[in-house]
Image (cartoon, grey):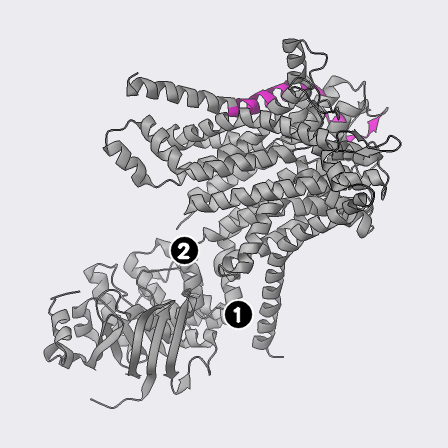
Amino acid sequence: MVSRPVKFSIQGLHVHYGELCVLRELSLEILANEIFTVIGPANSGKTTFLHSLNRLIDLAPGSRVSGRILLDGDDIRLRLEKENLRRKVGIVFALPLPLPLSIYENIVYGLRMQGVRDRAVLDEAVERSLRESYLWEEVKDRLRSPAMNLSGGQQQRLCMARILAGRPDVLLFDEPTSGLDPISTARIEETLLELKERYTIVLVTNNVAQAARVGDRTAFFLMGEMVEVSETGRMFTAPADPRTSDYITGKFG
Amino acid sequence: MNPARLRKLKEWLIERAILLSGVFSVVFVVLIFLFLLREGLSLFRGESVLDFLFGKSWYPISEPPRFGILPLILGSLLVTLGAAAISVPIGLAAALFIAEIAPGRLKEGLKAGIELLAAIPSVVIGFIGMITLGPFIKKLFAVPTGLTALTGSVTLAFMAMPTIVSIAEDAITAVPRQYREAAIAMGATKWQTTWRIVARAARPGMVAAVMLGIGRVIGETMAVMMVTGNAAVIPSGMLQPVRTLTATIAAEMGESVQGGSHYAALFAIGIVLFVITFLINGVADLYLHRSRK
Amino acid sequence: MSPRLSQKIAFALLFLATLLVVLPVAVILFIIVAKGASALSWDFLLTMPRDGMTAGGILPAILGTLYLVLGAVLFAVPLGVAAAVYLVEYSSDNRFSRLVKLAIVNLAGVPSVVYGLFGLGIFVTFFRFGASILSGALTLGIMILPVIITSAREALESVPRHFRTVSLSLGASRWQTVRHAVLPHALPGIMTGMILGLGRAAGETAPILFTVAAFYLPRLPQSLFDQTMALPYHLYVISTQVPGIPENVRYGTGLVLLALVLLLNLAAIVLRARFRRKKKW
């Protein structure tokens, strides 16, 4: 495997909600241009981990975070503004959540918030990001129609386009195919494999097979702790921890 | 300054203004109380608080003036109790009907009707009460004037009902569905469920509804002034003219001299009203919170 | 008595009670319209009162009420919406936000005549605005503040949480999120509250008694510092204070006031219903 530069370096991360510890003593590195998948049963801290990476965790009432997260060597709490961090580290949620705006306005939302007004720049971003998420051909003639009218799979790819428009570094996916049919799921997975050429991808999934299909490296979370992390192939053929093999062979979860 | 810094500054200012607006609602409550005190407290330089609250005569323009508000307190109390006796049972019954029994469209129509009743200006209700109810009561009981405590109670009952109905209806609707399903599953009729289970579970909200309705009645001014006859004497029955705290302020402020003791006495009545409604609303709010849990 | 029979009787009684609550609306409307309609004419609406209010129109009262109501809304809507934004979007459930909520509950419960006293004490006397449109509008504005805040709060809370999460996740700041992802979707609800506030301010008499209302002033106000007649006070005056007013003038005034207030409320009800039906989320 080619050695790649480190994108995210997570050092001793703890997350509490009030008194409840949901993520403890987490240290790992995410490399540039890989698909890093996180698997584990419900309530194992996967989504909390993902939300820590772009500080959406700050929105959860009573959340406390300790430890350090470095993005390209910069501490995301000390060296980056929240808004800039979230632009660099975009997220696609489990359910497709378009804003009740047109397709076009959904995509340029982030750019508009940055103060971009130039029509040509916005148009370019819309076309580029829709092409990147393989939605352009389907919607290019109805960019002004409401995003809510798209199908579920299309909405989810619109949500991808929406973060791609802001030229992020890292894409976070939180079980992006959990609400979709198998065909839409396959299209999203294909898209992920394309996108990793240009972006670093962190994919949280409760679908073990999906991790095996697209992941370069995989981490297994259980009850707020990372049980193990390794290359995906090794994880699925020779897991180091018996709990991992129990989970991926379907004994629990 | 670069655009990003400028935007930051703008947002900082907007967010301060938003916080300040939240502060303002507290400030207004405090200001209302302070200004009532400022204008009203001077009365108690020459008058003891006890004489004011429990004095039996209200002769503000005789010489020397007498500022005993007991007749006014009793007038308010009498009218309010009468209005509560009418509006509480009817209001709660209507709330149960609308929340539990009325089907979809009828329900929406009734709710709109209640909202419209709440919206009718009190001076219009007072006007209608004066020209319809007044003569009716005069004739029915063969009394010298139809403008009595009873007329006030009936008129005010209609002003309390929208408050009682809408808040009680919210409380009843908020009762979890499982309660009803469990009762029905055990063989109870719809009415038994409504009466024994739902009404009981919604009780804190219903108490709050009644209190807020009563708060509205105590504070009501124009209608009550137009229909109760305004005699500032200690009432001895429902069929006599009475004068309430609110009507006294509204009727006499125009003829009082600013800074004089009569003026101060009217503000002092305002203090009494403010404290009463403050307590009622505070307690009602506690019940409302309890009903939400 | 069998459970079925007692259920029938109980439902009938409840229905009767409901009728008792709702019927007065129809009765009041019927009386006022039946007796007041004959007074309505362009002359009545658009001319000055004459001969000690026994003849002529009610133009100054109509205009006075419009000025007061507009002034009240101009004051209360920005303040009230901002306070609601604070409560829903910025405050966590801390001691201060609970204090604000308690204050709003109490503002809603303060008797209207006490607002009148307050307006007299602070605006007329302390700030020396005198009995004027300014004093009256500010007093009415503070009185309708709870109505505006409460409906704006409900409107903001009905906007799904995830709109905010999505907007923030796209790098929008907190205020941008409120401004672009929340407020536009709460707008119909905020408008509903504004219209309800208009209706409430238009119908109240006690708060304007000592702060602005003129008994008989057959000319139009020239500035914010003028007194003015107003519809609800005018109805009070001609129905209790001045003998010999022709009946249809009294009913006609009542009809104009009632029509104004009920139309505003009806508009609010319709707007809210349409908004609920159109909601896409």
Percent coordinates x, y for residue A97 in the rendering: 36, 60
Percent coordinates x, y for residue A14 in the rendering: 34, 76
Neighbour tally class for label 1: few under 14, some 14-19, many 20 plus, Cα within 10 Å: few
Observer-nearest residue: C21 or A192? C21
To which quarter of the image does residue B18 belong? bottom right
Residue located farthest toward the right when viewing the structure as drawn: B63
Q: Label 2 lies in what chain?
A: A
Looking at the rendered structure, the kind of residue marked 2 is: Ser
Q: Label 1 lies in what chain?
A: A
Residue tagged 2: A145
Compared to residue A209, the image places residue B76 above or below, namely above
User: Is residue C32 one of those drawn in magenta?
Assistant: yes
Residue tagged 1: A117
To which quarter of the image does residue C120 belong? top right
Query: Is C241 on the left-hand or right-hand side of B101?
Result: right
Observer-nearest residue: C277 or C197? C197
Percent coordinates x, y for residue A5 in the rendering: 31, 89
Query: What secondary structure prevails in the magenta region?
Result: helix
Compared to residue B58, the image places residue C23 above or below, namely above
Q: Is residue C129 visible?
A: no
Give the secondary structure at mark 2.
loop
Looking at the rendered structure, the kind of residue marked 1 is: Arg
Range drawn in magenta: C21-50
Closer to the chain start, of discs 2 and 1, is 1
Q: Which label is found at residue A16?
A: none
